[in-house]
Image (cartoon, grey):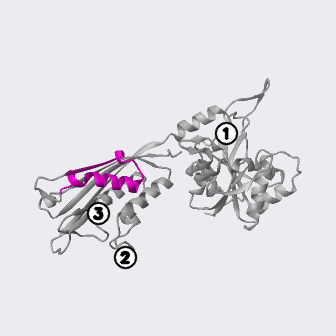
Amino acid sequence: MKNFYALIVAAGSGQRFGAETPKQFLPLGGLPVLHHSVRRLQNHPACAGVKVVIAPEHRTAFESVLNGLELVEGGTTRRESVHNGLKAYAQTLPDNALILIHDAARPLLSATDLNALLAALETHPCATLAAAVTDTLYRGAEPIPREGLWAMQTPQAFPLGLILTAHNTAPADQAFTDDVGLMLQNGHHVQFVAACAPNFKITQPQDFAMAQTLLHPETRHGQGFDVHAFDPQTQGVTAIRLCGVDVPFSQKLLGHSDADVGLHALTDALLGAIGTGDIGVHFPPTDAAYKNMDSAVFLAAARDKMVALGGRLINADITLICESPKIGPHREAMQRRIAEILQASPARINIKATTTEGLGFTGRREGIAAQACVSIEFPRQAV
Ligand code: MG
């Protein structure tokens, strides 16, 4: 699969939408519309770069939304804005670089449709997502046969050299509402790829309401389990690390890192909730870098992954299973420490402790087991 560069057009004022804030900056599922449109392309493994075209007057007002994005100044029309973005790319990229031009107001682009577009580009230099028209059409009282009619969507994908030449040579006063039209006029074939998932452009308030429904966060759950054994040969140990807190105890817990069984179970639960494997995948015990590591580092990394994917912790519930040490006196400190690592309210963290009534390895005081469950709010995936 070829690498691509995304050009997101976000310079519109959204006159048809009628809101004071341009629609691309309105919050949708807790994040601005633009954020969704960018992320859907940026998160694809073949995405090699993103530039966003914005109107200069929006730069200051929406700085927080634009944070970290490479910006290009927009023009007075969509065509001029795209042209500016292409010229910016041409400063560093060769003519054969693949550019995907995408509307900022299409926040629902699915991974499936993006992959279908990229697959078409393996055999066609130019391609676009589009939808076959299914409604019956009239112009005034005149019915229009809908056979062969397509409604254009984005991304629209072209080699940089071809699309830039088309922009450079088209008459300045010729209006185009998309780039496919410009390429067709220049005699290039553009492959239409039928979109399977909703990929509409937010144009009217009812579109925004529909996008809100489709992007309403979903709740996800993850669970984790871990065990660490006591070292009966221990000498000179005064404390063990449990749920990020040093708890007085005379036997060491065996482990490659600090052996914090509570944080390990919790990290696994969080990684499970966001669907990214387990602690061993991300922090292999064979890696010398993690020798005696503070397990707060693992939990913080899992939190960062969750945040990067747009997730938010709802609650975490941890159960420590052992005969000793006693957990009760340290429960609040553990709750506070975990809340600190997860950057969440302590009210969302619960620590429980139990014994196994003398049964099994925990009953024989051979080690400690821990279980954890987390719930998170997670952006709804289009597919
Ligand atoms: Mg462990």
Placement of the N terminus among the 4 image quadrants? bottom right
The mark found on residue 40 in the picture is none
Residue 13 against residue 179 in the figure, above or below: above
The magenta-colored residue range is 326-353
The prevailing secondary structure element of the residues shown in magenta is: helix
Q: Identify the amino acid type marked 3.
A: Asp
Is 92 contained in the magenta span?
no
Three-letter amino acid code at the position of disc 2 = Ala
Q: Which residue lies at the image location 45% right of the left edge and 54% below the top edge?
A: 306
- Disc 1/disc 2 C-alpha distance (Å): 51 Å
- Answer yes or no: is residue 174 visible: yes
Q: Position of residue 366 (x, y in %)?
A: 15, 64
Identify the amino acid type marked 1: Thr
Depth check, front residue: 375 or 189:
375
- Write down the quadrant of residue 205 in the picture: top right
Contact flag, marks 1 and 2 (Cβ < 8 Å): no
**Quadrant of the rendered image containing residue 293:** bottom left
The numbered disc on residue 21 is 1
Q: Is residue 109 above or below residue 85?
A: above
Q: Which residue is mark 3?
A: 260
Query: Is residue 241 found left or right of 120 in the rendered image?
Result: left
CB of mark 3 near ligand 1 (< 8 Å): yes
